[in-house]
């Protein structure tokens, strides 16, 4: 919700708005169990290269994507898990928490 509020508060021509909107859509889909849509939204956000102030968003995205394999059900679950794991790996460099956890391993 913070990303959505942040996006709404910005001027319409701010280049960060589409990325923040995609992030908000992706995380909302995740919370509703629509994992394919969550992955698509977070992919759109990540493709816009998160800014320096988006580390906390990357932390949440990384955590959510890392859980899809345990949460997804049905015939598409393996494909969703693979896509989420791949996107989580691409999100890791933008996630301060994930980088710290990895260095502790």
Image (cartoon, helix red, strand yellow):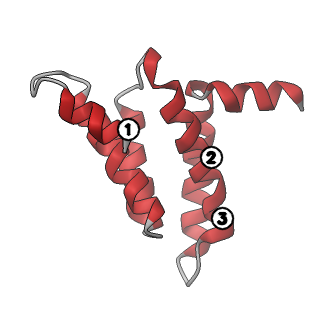
Label 1 crowding class (10 Å Cα cut-off): few <14, some 14-19, many 20+? Answer: few
The residue lying furthest to the top in this view is 52
Label 3: how many Cα within 10 Å (few below 14, some 14–19, many 20+): some
Measure the alpha-carbon separation of dots 1 and 3: 25 Å
Residue 51, disc: none
Question: Closer to the camera: disc 1 or disc 3?
Answer: 1
As drawn, which residue projects farthest toward the left? 12
The residue singled out by tag 1 in the image is: 2
Please tell me whether residue 30 is drawn above or below residue 66 in the rendered image: below
Alpha-carbon distance for marks 2 and 1? Answer: 16 Å
Secondary structure of the residue carrying tag 2 is helix
Q: Quadrant of the C terminus?
A: top right
Judge whether 52 appears above or below 55 on screen. Answer: above
Q: Which residue is mark 2?
A: 63
Whichever of callouts 2 and 1 sits on the residue coming sooner in the sequence is 1
Q: Name the residue beneath numbered marker 3.
A: 69
Q: Give coordinates of residue 70: x percent, y percent.
A: 69, 67
* For discs 2 and 1, the disc positioned in front in the rendered view: 1
**19 relative position to 52: left or right:** left
Say which residue appears at 56% left-offset and 68% top-offset. 79
User: CA gap, disc 3 to disc 2?
Assistant: 12 Å
Question: Residue 23, percent across and down?
Answer: 37, 43
Q: In what quadrant of the picture does the N terminus appear? A: top left
Q: Earlier in the sequence, mark 1 or mark 3?
A: 1
């Amino acid at each position: 919700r913070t990303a959505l509020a942040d996006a709404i508060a910005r001027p319409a021509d701010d280049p960060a708005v589409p990325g923040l909107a995609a992030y908000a859509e992706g995380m909302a889909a995740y919370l509703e169990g629509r994992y394919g849509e969550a992955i698509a939204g977070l992919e759109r956000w990540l493709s816009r290269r998160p800014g320096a102030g988006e580390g906390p968003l990357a932390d949440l995205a990384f955590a959510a994507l890392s859980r899809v394999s345990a949460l997804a059900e049905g015939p598409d679950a393996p494909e969703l898990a693979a896509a989420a794991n791949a996107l989580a790996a691409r999100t890791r460099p933008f996630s301060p928490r994930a980088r710290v956890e990895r260095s502790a391993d």
